[in-house]
Image: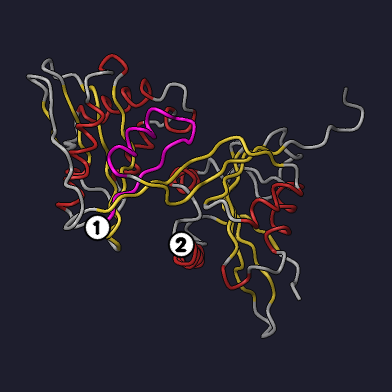
Amino acid sequence: MSGSLTLSVSSPDEAREPFLRLVARAALVDGQPPFNDQALIDIGKGTRSLLLAERRIAEGGVAVAGAAIVGQGELEFVIDPEWRGEGLGRQLLEIVLKNPPAPTGAGSGAGAGAPDALRAWAHGDHPASRRLAKTHRFEAIRTLLQLRRELGAGTAAPGEVVLPSGYSLTGFRGGPDVDDWVALNARVFAEHDEQGSLTRDDLLFRLSEPWFDPDDFLLLRDADGALVAYNWLKVEPNDTRVGEIYVIGVDEGQAGRGLGRSLMNAGLARLEERGCTHAALYVDGDNERAVALYRSLGFADHTIDVQYLHRPLPRRGAL
């Protein structure tokens, strides 16, 4: 029988150990992390709140049964695999919907009322997530595909890297690379709220992560030295089997020159060099052009993430 949950706003430093243990257990069972990188960055910046979900156990102590990251109109949460199937996900979601918290540092309690619109990610598109969405007025608005392909012996080798005359492909070297990348990324993803809104501080935070390797951040400059494309790779230090095409972008003015395919081939070759046996990437399901490119390079479906939009009931007296 499930006990009731208590949800508390926690600072990332205070909650670090139990939170990281929870994330590791969930990732091991689910095959992917329960929170995206930007959500983790935002709790460190104080622009979103980290909530720990606790419940009393028979021994008289308290167990961390789940966690949520809330703020900026977005929600991600996870229940510890040990406590799943007892209705705790429903309890956690209902508490958040009734008591949306203020950002960490902006106050210690809940906000003044439910937000007009709340977006929530379901990483892995689990049946339990779909049931919660259906019973709590969440509508699927975006599908993010994780694609994978094998690397190494017995698989097709990455294709040729063909670049226009005078173009150079190098690793990330800091200095002007920082602002050049932020500007190019904003242009490439101008219509993509999450990726296109990354700031200089967001980039610098990622550069300080344990997984960052400057030689995995491939930058393509034209004959005049202008940054025109990039392929950023991510290899976790504690698991080098899967290397991720973290984000890839090509300036719109360079479209049609095969730079995206060449950068993908360069990235795959680099991941093989790092000893990765699989390459992974995320792409919006409705980005037909990109999906076609990745499939032509040997990528196939692995998992699906779904973003939901909560549509609350109209307030009494509202037209």
Mark 2 neighbour density, 10 Å: few (under 14) some (14–19) many (20 or more)? some
- Disc 2 to disc 1, how far (Cα)? 19 Å
Colouring scheme, one of rainbow, by chain, secondary structure, one colour = secondary structure
Task: Identify the residue position indicated by label 1 in the image.
Answer: 277
**Quarter residue 240 falls in:** bottom left
Name the residue at the left extreme.
166
Residue type of the residue flagged with mark 2: Ala
Is 290 one of the magenta-colored residues?
Answer: yes
Question: To which quarter of the image does residue 201 belong?
Answer: top left
Q: Position of residue 216 (x, y in %)?
A: 21, 44
Q: Is residue 246 above or below residue 86?
A: above
Residue 275 falls within the magenta-colored stretch? no
Element under disc 2: helix
Query: Considering depth in this image, is 95 or 234 the residue closer to the camera?
Result: 234
The quadrant of the image that shows the N terminus is bottom right
Nearer-N-terminus badge (2/1): 2
Percent across and percent down for residue 176 are 20, 27
The type of residue carrying mark 1 is: Thr
Q: Which mark is residue 27?
A: 2
Q: Find residue 201 and name its label.
A: none
Mark 2 vs mark 1: in front:
1
In the image, 10 versus 97, the foreground residue is 97
Q: Which residues are magenta?
A: 278-298
Front position in the image: 254 or 302: 302
Residue drawn 29% across and 20% down?
A: 251
Residue 227 figure quarter: top left
Farthest-out residue, right: 317
Count of marks, rendered view? 2
| Image x and y of residue 55, in percent | 68, 70
Check disc 1 and report its element: helix, strand or loop: loop
Please report the residue visible at 30 percent of the width from the left and 62 percent of the height from the top: 239
Task: Give the residue displayed 47% in from the left and 58% down from the top.
Answer: 13
